[in-house]
């Protein structure tokens, strides 16, 4: 197995683990988001609280399982928090605010097709689309900056020689 094939398989495994952790965190985030949004009526409060709760679990799971960090450091945690919160609070909240009027303008008969799930799906539609933006944002920053694997970088340089 060549070095590039080994690097490719390692990257693919990393993406799969990141995806599974992301699915878990997203489901947790969304469930909490729906509950808080129904209690407060505020998409901003709901998004900030839900994403904050998912943040800690995401750091712990991704640092150890996805990116195989040897130890937790204050620097990696602070970078993780800054990158993640910008993605969640600025990018995601902004996208939700931009997409919610589109959801609200969607004809009611389309929402009625979802029966008892109509209300939840109407709330979640902008959140789901906004989540796609933050997933890409997070993976790029986590992989290239926060949990950058120095050994993988060295392996890549050696394979180029």
Image (tube, rainbow, N blue to C red):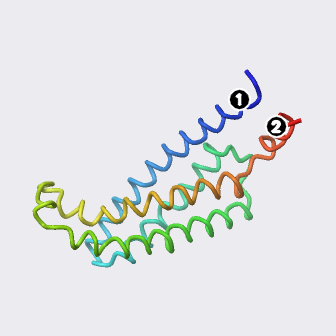
Q: Quadrant of residue 74?
A: bottom right
State if disc 2 and disc 1 touch (CB < 8 Å): yes
Residue drawn at (66%, 34%) of the image: 8
Q: Label for residue 79?
A: none
Residue 65: x %, y % from top left: 61, 43
Q: SS class of the residue under badge 1?
A: helix
Residue drawn at point x = 71 percent, y = 34 percent: 7
The picture quadrant where one finds residue 31 is: bottom left
Q: What is the C-alpha distance between the residues marked 1 and 2?
A: 10 Å
The answer to whether 2 is drawn above or below residue 13 in the figure is: above
Q: Determine whether, in the image, residue 96 is placed left or right of residue 142.
A: left
Residue 105 in the image: state x and y as whole percent: 21, 73
The image shows residue 102 at horizontal and vertical percentages of 28, 71
Provide the residue designation for mark 2. Answer: 155
Residue 4 vertical placement versus 79 (above, below): above
The residue singled out by tag 1 in the image is 6
The C terminus lies in quadrant: top right
Which residue lies most toward the right here?
161
- The mark tally for this picture is 2
**Left or right placement of residue 60 versus residue 113 in this view:** right
């Amino acid at each position: 197995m060549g070095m590039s094939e080994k690097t490719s398989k390692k990257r693919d495994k990393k993406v799969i683990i990141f995806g599974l952790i992301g699915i878990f965190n997203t489901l947790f985030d969304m469930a909490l988001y729906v509950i808080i949004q129904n209690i407060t009526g505020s998409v901003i409060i709901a998004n900030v609280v839900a994403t904050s709760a998912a943040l800690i679990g995401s750091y712990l799971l991704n640092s150890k399982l996805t990116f195989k960090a040897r130890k937790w450091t204050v620097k990696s945690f602070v970078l993780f928090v800054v990158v993640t919160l910008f993605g969640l609070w600025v990018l995601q909240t902004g996208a939700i605010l931009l997409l919610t009027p589109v959801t609200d303008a969607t004809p009611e008969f389309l929402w009625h097709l979802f029966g008892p799930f109509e209300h939840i799906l109407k709330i979640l539609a902008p959140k789901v689309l906004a989540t796609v933006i933050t997933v890409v944002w997070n993976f790029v920053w986590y992989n290239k900056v926060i949990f950058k694997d120095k050994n993988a970088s060295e392996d890549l340089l050696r394979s180029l020689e």
